[in-house]
Image (tube, rainbow, N blue to C red):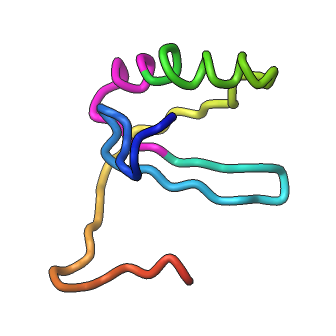
Amino acid sequence: MQLGGHSAPGVLYHWAAQANTGMKAVDVYETRAAADHLAQEQIGPIVAELGLPMPQISELDVHAVLAPAENITLSSAI
């Protein structure tokens, strides 16, 4: 997906990282419909073109979100 460094429509939060078992990603969507739309319209065609299976998706309800205090810069080098 060519998003120019921006998240897809309906995505509130995204991160991805390499894990021992492959890539892991966490996405928080505005709605379940937004998540379903992205999976069907964007992810599905890409993985099909690459000959890959659809990623395993787990769904969790978000109960709280913490945000950094103002004027704090988060570093990608943790």
Vertical order, 2 against 68 (above or below): above
The residue drawn where x is 51% and y is 33% is 59
* Magenta extent: 27-37
Q: How many marks?
A: 0
The residue drawn where x is 31% and y is 83% is 73
Residue 37 left/right relative to 44 = left
Vertical order, 32 against 41 (above or below): below
> Where does the image place residue 37, in percent across and percent down from the top left?
41, 17
> Where does the image place residue 39, in percent across and percent down from the top left?
52, 22
Magenta segment includes 63: no
Residues 46 and 17: in front is 46
Residue 49 falls in image quadrant? top right
Residues 37 and 57: in front is 37
> Where does the image place residue 76, in percent across and percent down from the top left?
50, 76
Quarter of the figure with the C terminus: bottom right
The residue drawn where x is 66% and y is 50% is 24
Residue 72 left/right relative to 61 = left
Residues 2 and 67: in front is 2
> Where does the image place residue 67, in percent across and percent down from the top left?
26, 68
Residue 76 left/right relative to 21 = left
Magenta segment includes 35: yes
Vertical order, 73 against 9 (above or below): below
The residue drawn where x is 63% and y is 24% is 46
Query: What is the residue that sits farthest to the left in this orientation?
Result: 70
